[in-house]
Image: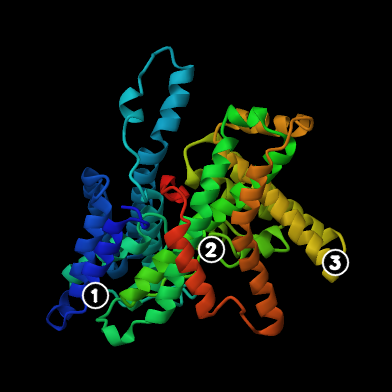
Amino acid sequence: MLFNSFPFIFLVLITMFFYYQKSLLSYQRQILIISSSVFYAYGQPSLLLLLMFSASINSIISYLVYFEKNISKKRGWAIFGVAFNLLILIYFKYIGLFVGIFDKYSPFNDVGEFFILIPLPIGISFYTFQGISLVVDLYRKDSKKQKNCWEVERDFSKHFLDTIFFISFFPQLIAGPIVKAYQFYPQIQKKVIKGVQFEKSFKLLIVGYFFKMVVADNLKDQTFWMMYPYFESLSSINLLVLLIGYSMQIFSDFAGYSLIAIGVAKLYGYNLSINFCFPYIAKSFSEFWTRWHISLSTWLKEYLYIPLGGNKKGNLKTYLNLMLVMAFGGLWHGAAISYMVWGIYHGLLLSVERFVQKNIINIKTPLFDYLKVFIVFSFVTIGWLLFKLPNFFQVLLYLKAFSMNFNISINKLGVFLIICYSLPIIMYHLSYLIYKKTGKNYLDNSFTYSVMLFLIVTNSGSSGEFIYFQF
């Protein structure tokens, strides 16, 4: 069920109607679980069983981890819980890649046809990570590192219900933000309509829908021409502008989804973490990853980078950890070599940056800061080619066409449209810089929201799925 569809709007409103009925306040979790099930089953009804199976097993394992007094048994249950979530993710998301490699080098043909035809459950990358978060957080409950633990209900039926709710909560179920258990469970309590932040929620929804329906969907119609073989006949200028346009599109598409998810969650009294914080003004690659897909980057840091040793075991190990974590983060996006290359590419950028900052004087002037923003944006944007063209060979062809097609005439209309639909994202980032300097947000006013709402109604692009639905 798409966020930008009438069935979704109807689901949100009808859920709110029952959710805040005085006679049903004790059943709020059950109401949201039912709505979440309808939301998830709308496109793939059979895969709802997998979601509920995953949530059920995580509820059992996390309960055992929390109340087990024997340290070795507690560790054993925790390892089992992490392994269970990873196996589900690997089986449904990566089995086709492994079988494809096996088929390529195996004397047996079509051995993996059955596995390749297995459908990819939407949102599986997100809810398996939440399951891991739950198990690990409860395993760490006695550790000084885990300061944000909560008390698990001794009554298993209540913990079971809480866990089903946590994993299936529909605003963030399909594409995040990835919610960590210690952030969500303490919020599970009775909500009243007086506590709803309606104004803040509506602002988030308007900006989110504007980013998706006006910016991303219109840019989508233009960046279609980046696909093979269309790009081979385009000029170098058009290829450059298209790549910048796709960079704006993927931001507005995913940031739009996250803002809608956060806005809808607020309608039910739940606060989800911000997922994007003006990433295209980052002055370093490490800063970029504190601003882009924040819920994923912090998850990787807390549950993978730090357990591997982080930056505490020497420079060489730090660089290796960065490469491993980012390669894993790339593969998390999809079962394709290009995604892993994208992750390694960012790991390399982070490693080189760390080396330069430690061994070369870091110049601090306003002019150099602008140059660093330009450098970071340029390298990040080049990396998005690996998302648009998951076939790595096609990425090389695109770069080849860009370096050779200088004599081809420019499609001026295409350039103009991409610039027009990219301007809101540029203004959005610039307004934040102005806000940091003056303390005034000139875009946060009723006129701006009215214009965005008007454009949503009158100038939305052709409807399409969110890019991160495929992950």
Percent of width and height locating residue 326: 59, 50
Q: Amino acid at mark 1?
A: Glu
The residue wearing badge 3 is 367
Q: Residue at x 41, y 50 (%)?
A: 125
Decide which of tag 2 and tag 1 comes sooner along the chain: 1
Percent of width and height locating residue 226: 59, 37
Verify CB contact (< 8 Å) between mark 2 and mark 3: no
**Foreground: 69 or 359?**
359
**Number of residues whose C-alpha sits closer than 10 Å to that of mark 1, classed few (under 14), some (14–19) or many (20 or more):** few
Verify CB contact (< 8 Å) between mark 3 and mark 1: no
The residue wearing badge 2 is 294
| Quadrant of the rendered image containing residue 109 | top left
The residue wearing badge 1 is 153
Q: CA distance from mark 3 to mark 1?
A: 56 Å
Percent of width and height locating residue 235: 72, 34
- Disc 1 is placed on an element classified as loop
Which dot, 2 or 3, sits closer to the camera? Answer: 3
- Disc 3 is placed on an element classified as helix
Colour mapping:
rainbow
Q: Residue at x 52, y 77 (%)?
A: 447
| Quadrant of the rendered image containing residue 457 | bottom left
